[in-house]
Image: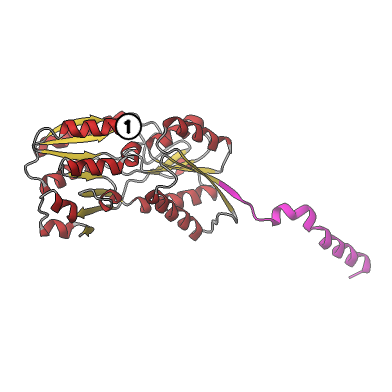
């Protein structure tokens, strides 16, 4: 090689890192996370830990090649709207969220930034996606319900409380799917099969919850179905305590409510949903469009029974039912 060519090559090698530095540096991607709960909610923090852990297993590490912006609304609808806009204004590569109202708040602010949701009962009815198989827009994710779920809740309640002839279902119409209509219609249909009268119990705040449960418990034969929405989740300790005080057999949609003293729960494994959601976030960060990722129905339901609470209520849980449970709290 001639000296001139060698020097040119060496000179070029010395200089190439300067113009190519941007390509050599690792690209940091940005995601937003919007949660309609309090930031000190240990259950939701545990679910998010599963989300972050799954991202890490896929090669995304916060503080390295990933930046995560968290926002917690604490059940405040105005704060939820403000934080949704704030996250959208940050222009992240993708936003992950949980619940119907949080997804609605984000969709209101963007139809371009990819959104992955979890624990949304009726994404088609809410207008988030065109269909489960073909979302068609910037939104996709994982539901927590299917049409047979309400019938299962009533079946389980009837098994532990055979004398039940009325079922009250508590929800916040401001944040429940389709204002509560989604579950209301399913419950009314299923109630006929079990010979119980459904009683809607719409609430908005703590005082409403106490009044509603107090009024409902005034007649015998009642059972309580606590629908999954942001308000019932934020006020879950109060609902569990009131069900115990008024000796109402109650069923909940998330396992942590049985862990925290509720009689029993039947519903999705939220950590499992969050891990699947992390897989979708990974695929979007790698170039897949949300419209090409079908909305997924839940695959895994868990039954958890709290025997201590059953004993306090004077209820007997059969051995057969205990064997059906994924977990029994003694």
Please name the residue shown 86% across and 65% down the image: 10
Is 27 magenta? The answer is yes
Please name the residue shown 21% across and 35% down the image: 169
Is 204 displayed left or right of 17 in the figure? left
In which quadrant of the rendered view does residue 2 lie?
Answer: bottom right
Residue neighbourhood size for the residue with mark 1, other residues' Cα within 10 Å, grouped as few (<14), some (14–19), many (≥20):
few
> Is the C terminus in the top left, top right, bottom left or bottom right quadrant?
bottom left
Task: Say what secondary structure mark 1 lies in.
Answer: loop
Is 10 displayed left or right of 264 in the figure? right
Q: Which residues are magenta?
A: 1-30
Percent position (x, y) of residue 225?
21, 40
In which quadrant of the rendered view does residue 103 lie?
Answer: top left
For the question of whether residue 48 can be seen, the reply is: yes
- The residue to which callout 1 is attached is 205
Is 206 magenta? The answer is no
Percent position (x, y) of residue 306?
20, 54
Magenta: predominant secondary structure element? helix
Q: Foreground: 241 or 197?
A: 241
> Is the N terminus in the top left, top right, bottom left or bottom right quadrant?
bottom right
Please name the residue shown 38% across and 36% down the image: 100
Residue 7, relative to residue 277: is it above or below?
A: below
Residue 111, relative to residue 1: is it above or below?
A: above
């Amino acid at each position: 090689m001639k000296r001139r060519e060698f020097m040119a090559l060496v000179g070029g090698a010395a200089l190439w890192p300067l113009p190519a530095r941007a390509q050599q540096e690792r690209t940091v991607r940005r995601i937003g996370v919007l949660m309609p709960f309090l930031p000190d909610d240990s259950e939701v923090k545990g679910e998010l830990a599963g989300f972050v852990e799954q991202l890490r297993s896929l090669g995304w590490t916060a503080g390295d090649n990933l930046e995560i912006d968290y926002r917690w609304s604490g059940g405040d609808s105005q704060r939820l709207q403000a934080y949704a806009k704030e996250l959208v204004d940050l222009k992240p590569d993708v936003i992950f969220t949980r619940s119907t109202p949080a997804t609605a708040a984000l969709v209101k602010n963007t139809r371009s930034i990819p959104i992955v949701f979890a624990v949304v009962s009726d994404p088609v009815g809410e207008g988030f996606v065109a269909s489960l198989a073909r979302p068609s827009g910037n939104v996709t994710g994982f539901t927590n319900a299917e049409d047979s779920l309400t019938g299962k809740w009533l079946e389980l309640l009837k098994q532990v409380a055979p004398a039940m002839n009325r079922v009250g279902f508590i929800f916040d119409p401001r944040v429940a799917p389709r204002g509560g209509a989604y579950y209301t219609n399913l419950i009314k249909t299923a109630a006929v099969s079990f010979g119980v009268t459904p009683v809607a119990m719409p609430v908005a705040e703590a005082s409403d919850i106490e009044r509603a449960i107090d009024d409902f418990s005034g007649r015998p034969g009642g059972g309580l179905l606590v629908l999954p929405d942001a308000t019932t989740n934020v006020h879950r300790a109060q609902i569990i305590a009131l069900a115990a005080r008024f000796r109402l057999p109650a069923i909940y949609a998330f396992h942590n409510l049985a862990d925290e003293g509720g009689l029993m729960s039947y519903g999705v494994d939220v950590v499992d949903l969050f891990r699947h959601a992390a897989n979708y976030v990974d695929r979007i960060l790698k170039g897949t469009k949300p419209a090409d990722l079908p909305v997924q129905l839940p695959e895994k339901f868990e039954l958890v029974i709290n025997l201590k609470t059953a004993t306090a209520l004077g209820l007997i849980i059969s051995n057969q039912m205990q064997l059906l449970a994924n977990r029994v709290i003694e």
